[in-house]
């Protein structure tokens, strides 16, 4: 009697492969998301007087948990060209700040609303002149900020508006050389607004 050979062993073509594991082409995902965003607008600040100046902000925020809207990171802020007019003294002042920031996003479809808080250091410098001569100075102070952004998202891109408040808990007032007349105060309070655009990157 002839004995039939055993049936061939079929390879398992339905074996389960965990996404991102065991393949050099698909390295494991870290789950991190990095948002880079830029804001351009204006700021209204109040010290001895009220001034309006262009305001620019660049921020990088990390979203460590994809299912959570919390983002934390750093921001840099710049304002230039605000005018000073106190009596016979005329000039301008500039501000820049480095901040630690955090935001919490609430998403509904393509709409995202994200309140934020930030704190850091702000450097303010001024220069100007009066009939007695030129004068300039500056100082670095603590700044605390808060606000919100509202934006529309399309894929990894987003665009919208940003509104914020800023407070300097401790400021400094400057007087004319050889006089008690006040010419400039580091702004205690400010309101900012502008257009914001961002991109979300996944390492």
Image: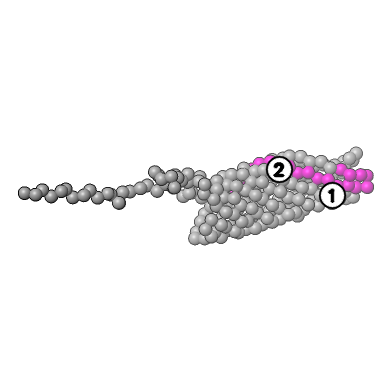
Residue 9: x percent and y percent? Answer: 22, 48
Please state the total of marks drawn on the protein image: 2
Residue at the spot 61% in from the left edge and 44% down from the top edge: 74
* Residue with the mark numbered 1: 91
Task: Give yes or no for residue 76 being in the magenta stretch.
Answer: no
* Span highlighted in magenta in the image: 116-135
Q: Is residue 123 magenta?
A: yes
Rendering colour mode: one colour
Q: Is residue 54 left or right of residue 9?
A: right
User: 83 or 197, which lies in front?
Assistant: 197
| 120 vs 46: above or below | above
Left or right: 134, with 190 as reference point: right
Disc 2 residue crowd, few under 14, some 14–19, many 20+, Cα 10 Å: many
Query: Mark 1, residues whose alpha carbon is within 10 Å: few (<14), some, or many (≥20)?
Result: many
Label 1 vs label 2: CA separation?
20 Å
Q: Where is mark 2, residue-wise?
A: 122
Q: Is residue 40 above or below residue 170?
A: below
């Amino acid at each position: 009697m002839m004995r039939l050979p055993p049936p061939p062993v079929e390879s398992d073509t339905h074996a389960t492969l965990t996404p991102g594991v065991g393949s050099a082409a698909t390295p494991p995902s870290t789950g991190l998301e990095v948002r880079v965003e830029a804001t351009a607008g204006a700021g209204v600040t109040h010290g001895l007087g009220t001034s309006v100046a262009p305001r620019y902000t660049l921020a990088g925020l990390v979203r460590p948990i994809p299912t959570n809207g919390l983002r934390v990171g750093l921001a840099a802020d710049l304002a230039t060209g605000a005018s000073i007019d106190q009596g016979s003294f005329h000039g301008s002042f500039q501000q820049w700040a480095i901040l630690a920031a955090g935001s919490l996003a609430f998403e509904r479809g393509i709409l995202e609303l994200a309140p934020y808080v930030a704190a850091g250091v702000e450097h303010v410098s001024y220069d100007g002149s009066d009939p007695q001569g030129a004068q300039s100075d500056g100082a670095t102070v603590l700044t605390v900020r808060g606000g919100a952004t509202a934006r529309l998202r399309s894929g990894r891109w987003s665009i919208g508006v940003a509104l914020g408040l800023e407070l300097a808990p401790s400021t400094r007032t400057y007087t004319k050389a050889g006089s008690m007349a006040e010419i400039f105060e580091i702004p205690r309070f400010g309101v900012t607004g502008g257009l914001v655009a961002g991109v979300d990157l996944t390492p």
